[in-house]
Amino acid sequence: MKEMVLGLFMATIAGGSAIAEDTVFNGFYSGTEAVGTFSTSDTGEGSGQKTVGGFLGASWSNGALYGAVEAEVAIGLGFEEDLSEAYEPHRTASISAIAGVQATDNLIVFGRVGVQAAQVRARRGDDVQSRKASGLRLGIGADYAIAPGIRLRAEVGRSYLSGVNIEEMESTEIRLGLINQF
């Protein structure tokens, strides 16, 4: 009887951890993030920005392989001080495909490719103009499950914006986020 109870207990623990491993990164999720961005235009001018945003996604995994589709919106928090010329992706929206591998039970390492649209504010002296742009978004990062349904995200990315109303603009982004899986 003791062996049967111990066996049932071990099977429950093994089954529970297998379920947890299988579902940690599966399903729908939402998140919020803080972004630090350094942008340069085709004129060579650069500026730094702070952005906050939110995102929704759907993810699935098959063994160690991971995939997700994610939609994000973000808003800039203002221009860096003391620059006579600056560019800020003031409002952005993007859709991305994410592919990665589950490196450990709690860690996903991923790459991102997506498209984005932005309202970019350009400052030249005291003149601030708003322009529309679109382009490519790339990134690499990691999600780490800190509790059931809760993940931390760190990502480094590049955005390439251009359009008929804006010079080409490239941005390097550092993103830190908190994700709620539901």
Image (tube, rainbow, N blue to C red):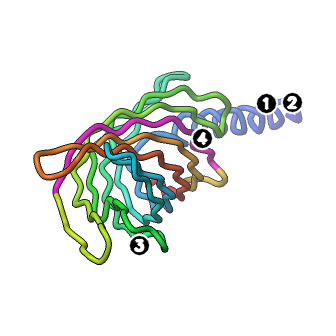
- Element marked by disc 1: helix
Pointers 4 and 1 in contact (C-beta within 8 Å): no
Which circle, 3 or 4, is nearer the viewer? 3
Residue under label 1 = 7
Instruction: Say which quarter of the image contains residue 32.
Output: bottom left
- The image quadrant that residue 6 belongs to is top right
Within 10 Å of the Cα at label 3, are there few (<14), some (14-19), or many (20+) other Cα atoms? Answer: some
On the image, numbered disc 2 is attached to which residue?
A: 3
Q: Is residue 55 magenta?
A: no
* Tag 3 and tag 2, C-beta contact below 8 Å: no
Residue found 41% across the figure and 72% down from its top: 77
- Cα–Cα span, label 4 and label 2: 25 Å
User: Nearest the camera: 86 or 146?
Assistant: 86
Q: Identify the mark at residue 20; answer none if there is no mark.
A: 4
Q: Outermost residue, bottom direction?
A: 126
- Which residues, given as a range, are shown in magenta? 132-145
Question: Which residue lies under the disc numbered 3?
Answer: 77
Distance from label 3 to label 2 (Cα)? 62 Å
- Residue type at tag 4: Ala
Image quadrant in which the C terminus is located = bottom left
Question: Is 16 above or below relative to 103?
Answer: below
Q: Residues at badges 1 and 2 in contact (C-beta under 8 Å)?
A: yes
Q: Position of residue 91 (x, y in %)?
A: 28, 63
Of 150 and 125, the residue lying toward us: 125
